[in-house]
Amino acid sequence: MTHPSDERAYFFKIDTAIKRIRYALQKRFTDAGFDLTVDQWVLIDHLHRNPGISQNQLGELTTKDAPTVTRIIDILTKKGLAERRMSDDDRRKFLISLTAAGEGVYAQLLPMVVDIRRQGWGELSDEDYQHFTRIMDSIYRNFSA
């Protein structure tokens, strides 16, 4: 028996939507004169919400591997937007936070990000959002084990 998902490349639809959103957001950043990538924004956003987080935790939250997180943190540090400090309890662990400049960039970029999110969501309802998150969470769980 053929399952409906056998012939429906739902992952392709997810991937193309993500690429379109990333492109729109990157264009908005570039047009506004910000020298930041969407991946750098993702870390800035998580650092704003989780100051003093470890690199490992940041990787888990952003689903990025350790070398990628390290590279992005290095870039953000060089730009003066983030800082590392050694953990008081474990000298092998670094805690990452935004600097004042990083918080300023966050505050400037957030309205652009919100605008892109609203544009993408369009006229979809709260009920649509509930269905969407339920479906995406289910797909995610199907690959977690």
Image (cartoon, grey):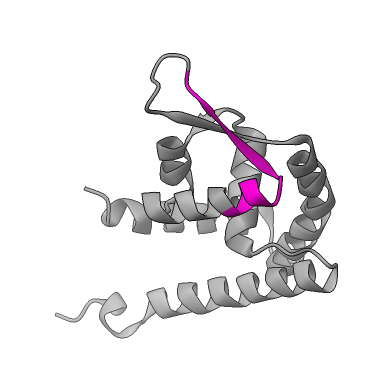
All told, the count of numbered labels is 0
What residue is at 30 percent from the left and 76 percent from the top?
5
Q: Where is residue 67 in the image (x, y as percent from the top left)?
A: 39, 54
Q: Where is residue 51 in the image (x, y as percent from the top left)?
A: 62, 30
The picture places residue 60, in percent across and down from the top left corner, at: 41, 43
Name above or below for residue 6 compared with residue 94.
below
- Which residue occupies the foreground of this view, 34 or 1? 34
| Residue range highlighted in magenta | 75-87
Q: Which residue is drawn at 72% across and 36% down?
A: 99
In what quadrant of the picture does the N terminus appear? bottom left
Find the residue positioned furthest to the left.
1
Q: Specify whether residue 130 is in view.
A: no
Which quarter of the picture shows residue 117? Answer: bottom right
Compared across the picture, whether 134 is left or right of 47 comes to left
Point out residue 75 in the picture as x, y percentages from the top left corner. 59, 54
Q: Which residue is the extreme one toward the top?
A: 89
Judged left or right of residue 105, residue 69 is left
Q: Does the magenta stretch include residue 108?
A: no
Query: Looking at the image, which residue is at 26% across and 80% down?
Result: 6
User: Residue at image x 19%, y 81%?
Assistant: 2
Of residues 34 and 12, the one nearer the viewer is 34
Vertical position of residue 108 compared to residue 20: above or below: above
* Whether residue 58 can be seen here: yes
Q: In this view, does 7 lie to the left or right of 69?
A: left
Q: Is residue 77 magenta?
A: yes
